Image (cartoon, rainbow, N blue to C red):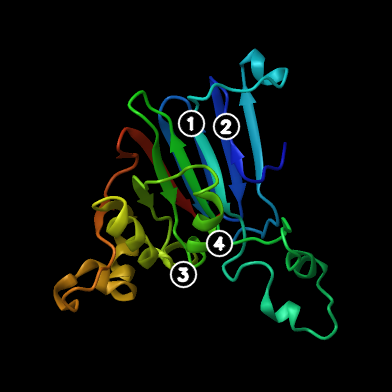
Amino acid sequence: MAVFLGIVRPPSHSLFSITRFTRQFSFTNNNSISISRKSFSRFKPIVTASLHSSSANSQNGAEVSANQSELMFLGTGTSEGIPRVSCLTNPLKTCPVCSKAAEPGSRNRRLNTSILIRHSRPSGNRNFLIDVGKFFYHSAMQWFPAYGIRTIDAVIITHSHADAIGGMDDLRDWTNNVQPSIPIYVASRDFEVMKKTHYYLIDKSDIIPGAAVSELQFNIIKEDPFIVHDLKVEASYSTS
């Protein structure tokens, strides 16, 4: 078991799985990813990752091939983020985590949970984003230029809370300046919520002429697994 910050490159013939709060993902080299979410689970303060491989190279620490798919943690924090303003303004200064997180460059500073998959294909990389929360702009500013991420080829929404959809409006930077549109994959119940919270991104009939909002293509998830480009995605939900 290991803790990863930043980017992870799984070697060949590997199964990569991570657990963060109530969400679980697994990514295999046969073009599939599994996403599950358990509600009411105990808070887990860090992202943990387990990497299993039959590749000899993974045992001796050799670098993986440049054409491997990559998994990047854009955020691993709570909905309100870390540090919390309430901790920093507390005269007693009783929270060592938030105090450390306030220091420049601290790894304790964490934004909304989000993952980017840079899926390597013979025709080129495709970038799949899982959740676009309130702090997405800040996450993208930190990671996208550093790793040369230019396009967003799809967004998968896990739920309709602000920490997963609060940054939808920021996608306008891509659809205005980089690409014509972005496909959004979302469950029907969450899409119904977004019709209220982000009505202007779904029904554009009332938009003021000249307003450049995000150009999004909403795809309702109707089956499990579903396909995002050529990547198979499996999603499951439970209350245990």
Disc 3 crowd, CA 10 A, few/some/many (<14, 14-19, 20+): some
Disc 2 crowd, CA 10 A, few/some/many (<14, 14-19, 20+): some
- Where residue 123 appears, as percent x and y from the top left, is 32, 26
Q: Which residue is painted at 40% across and 46% down in the image?
A: 150
Circle nearer the N terminus (1, 2): 2
Circle nearer the N terminus (3, 4): 4
Amino acid at the residue labelled 2? Arg
149 displayed left or right of 182: right
Circle nearer the N terminus (1, 4): 1
Badges 3 and 1: C-beta atoms under 8 Å apart? no
Q: Which residue is painted at 64% across and 22% down in the image?
A: 63
The N terminus sits in image quarter = top right
Amino acid at the residue labelled 3? Ala
Residue that numbered label 4 is attached to: 112
Real-space Cα distance between discs 4 and 2? 22 Å
* Number of the label disc, if any, that sits on residue 9: 2
Q: Which residue is painted at 54% across and 50% down in the image?
A: 143
Say if 209 sits above or below 159 in the image: below
Circle nearer the N terminus (3, 2): 2
- Where residue 32 appears, as percent x and y from the top left, is 41, 32
Badges 1 and 2: C-beta atoms under 8 Å apart? yes
Real-space Cα distance between discs 1 and 4? 23 Å
* Number of the label disc, if any, that sits on residue 69: 1
* Number of the label disc, if any, that sits on residue 10: none
The C terminus sits in image quarter = bottom right
Circle nearer the N terminus (3, 1): 1
